[in-house]
Image: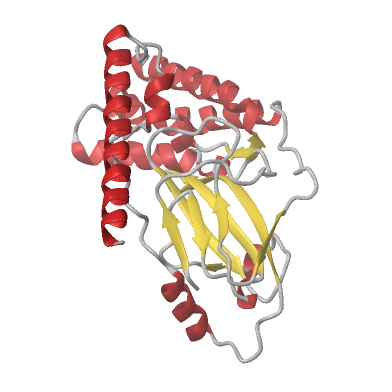
Amino acid sequence: MALVTLVGSTVLFPLIFRASTWACLFCFTTHEERLHVCQMFVGTEGSKLGQCKDALTAAFEGLSDMEINYDERSHLHDAFTQMTLSLQEVAAARGSFKAAFPSAAAKMKRTIHHLKKVQDCILPCVQDVTVKRGDQALFSCIVGFQLPESELTYSWKFAAGGLRTQDVSYFRDVPGAHGYLARIRPVQPTHRGTFSCVILHDQRPLARLYFYLNVTGPPPPGETELQVTFREVMNWTPREAETIEPWRPSLGELLARPSALTLDNLFLIAATAAFVSAGVTMLVWVFFRWYLSGD
């Protein structure tokens, strides 16, 4: 499949998506924050520090697959910040991380249950894209909300056979497609189906978009893909380079300028007209003299 990623774009299609995010520890706390919490509990000794970090991750493992409305992301971020401060207070009071981490995770789970749940997508959940056979199809994996500035990746998948679906079991990875904008050219009937783009932050999904590609137009009789490619190469012409040509005004354009009819210019025009008139008179006189001498 001739699917390639691009590096620049604009929003090419209106996007309908499930506005959700995942309530995960790694989405809302930094590595430095988690490290600082464990250092306060066990110090900087290597083995104990590793055990503390593993225990923190295990305590919040159950929150990794909990989806919330993306609009609640700021509230959830504040809740994780408050949780981090609370753990630091427990560590300062010489508490045990083995008891503190599960307790903090349980409180966070209760907080998440009180947040707005993820809303169902607005129909149609799959965006329709119609392209003529032989043209190109463009898909832009852009959402209408703020995304993290780092550790963002994009994953593209395709459900072939003309399927319109959101069932992940039908999708297969598209090799080489990793950017937020992708295109297919030339589009062929085999490209009819559903394309899916997943936006990931730190390898965890933030949003998923679906595009159904409908290919129109019957194939020309006896035409093969090789013939399509050959015709495209033959029809391609390089863009002509822009050149700057000197301006050569006509006599009328010169006379139309406000500064043209000065006294000096009028004198030159009169002298030129007189010279031309004298030249024409001389030519006529020479012609008649030659003609009469021939008789």
Instruction: Specify whether 77 is left or right of 113.
Output: left
Q: From the top left corner, tell me how far across and down residue 230 is, in percent.
A: 45, 80
Q: Residue furthest front?
A: 295
Residue 139, placed above or below residue 84: below
Residue 221, placed above or below residue 136: below
Q: Residue at x 41, y 33 (%)?
A: 149
Q: Is residue 92 visible?
A: yes
Q: From the top left corner, tell me how far across and down residue 61 is, in percent.
A: 51, 44
Residue 34, placed above or below residue 19: above
Which residue is at the front of the view, 91 or 143?
A: 143
Q: From the top left corner, tell me how far across and down residue 34 is, in percent.
A: 36, 30
Q: Residue furthest bottom?
A: 222
Q: Residue furthest left?
A: 45
Q: From the top left corner, tell me how far across and down residue 30 is, in percent.
A: 37, 30
Residue 41 falls in image quadrant: top left
Which residue is at the front of the view, 38 or 186?
A: 186
Instruction: Specify whether 48 is left or right of 130.
Output: left
Which residue is at the front of the view, 237 or 22?
A: 237
Residue 73 falls in image quadrant: top right
Q: Residue at x 39, y 65 (%)?
A: 237
Q: Is residue 243 visible?
A: no
Instruction: Specify whether 106 is left or right of 100.
Output: right
Which image quarter holds the C terminus?
A: bottom left
Q: Residue at x 72, y 63 (%)?
A: 165
